[in-house]
Structures are given as C-alpha cells and as structure tokens.
Image: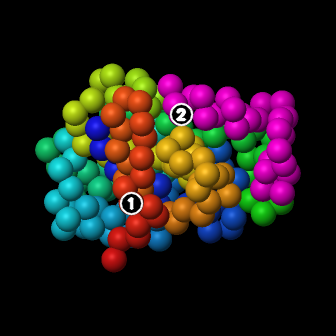
Amino acid sequence: MKIYAVRHGQTDYNQKRLVQGFMDNPLNDEGINQAIRMGHYLKKRAYPINHIITSPLIRALKTASIIKDLAYPQLQIELAPSFIERDFGFFEGKSVDETIKVISQFGFTHDNYEDNDVFLKRIAEGLTDLYQKQPNNHVLLTAHSHTIKALLILADPNTYHFMTFLNNASLCVFDYDGKTLSVDEFNVEAE
C-alpha cells in the first residue's frame, strides 16, 4: 500500500501560530490556494491514487475535496476519524511556540492531552485498519501536522519526531506492507 499524506492547507490559526487540535477551523484563502496547487501537482505527476481518506475536520476535508475535484474527480472521499489531529486539550488556542516548550518535555502528560504514547498507538491502529481494508491501493490521506509526524515517527523514529517541520499542504509518501512503514518522499511542496 502507498499512502500519499497531505497536510491540510493553511488556516488563520496556522498563520497566527496557534494550536488547533480538535478545533474545526476552516482553510483561509492561502490554504485554499495551497490545496489547489497540490491538486495540480498530484494531477501533473499522475500519481495512481485510487482511494481518498481524510480526517473529518473541515480543514482536512476541504483540502481533500479540492484535490479530488482537480486530480481525482472519479473518486469518493471517505472520512477516517482515526487520523484526526492530536487532542491538545487545554493547549488548543494557545501559542504553538509556548506549547511546544511544554509538551516536548520527555514523558509530558496533562488532563485531556493525548500524550505521545496514546497518540502514536491511535495512529498505528488506524494504519493497521487502513491496510486491512486497502492493502493493494494507493491512498491519498489528508490530515494534520501531528498525524503525519506520527506516521513519520512510526516509519523512522531515529530521523523524525514531533518537532519535525511540515509545511501546510505538503506531501509525504509512505510505503506500507502491513508490517514495515517506510518514507519515500518527505515534505514535498507543490510548485
């Protein structure tokens, strides 16, 4: 299975560097333009995507919808709640820069905050479930920064971590055979 993971386009919260988590913020104009550029990029390269899944949050769903309309109009979009963003709880709406200083401390936990172990387990289970349903498919996944970072960490924890930077509407491509997850492309931006 190949997974083409696209981070959602920019929101006003991204622009202001505020934590979103489960907040359901829409794309801003730049985010829409980023999704359009990624749709054209995927179409131009004729990636053989035959299944589209997305986090149910509107910023990811809208990104998926724009890409689908431009590059894969024949496909349907399936909601994939397993790949929703990390639950940041108390930190939602707060400064990314200040939050990172706190949550990146080894072993950090907080009420209503989805800690690293719990979050990585959720994403790993979502990946296993996706493979069981789509083992031979090329899947477009539109999701969130921490969701894609979790996939990167599951693939190569020595290279990637939750501080790894991902651009809005960037592409990471993974191979998964049901046991081993590997990274083929990382943080590719549409031209």
Disc on the earlier residue, 2 or 1: 2
Give the mark count.
Answer: 2
Which residues make up the magenta segment?
A: 99-125
Vertical side of 49 occupied by 89: above or below: above
Q: Is 175 in the magenta?
A: no
Answer yes or no: is residue 45 visible: yes
User: Identity of the amino acid at label 1?
Assistant: Glu
Residue tagged 1: 185
Distance between the Cα atoms at labels 2 and 1? 19 Å
Q: Is 111 in the magenta?
A: yes
Q: Position of residue 42 (x, y in %)?
A: 25, 61
Is 60 on the left or on the right of 146, as rendered? Answer: left
The image quarter in which residue 85 lies: top right
Residue tagged 2: 123
Q: Quadrant of the N terminus?
A: top left
Label 1 sits on a secondary structure element that is strand
Vertical side of 145 occupied by 180: above or below: above
The residue shown at (66%, 52%) is 162
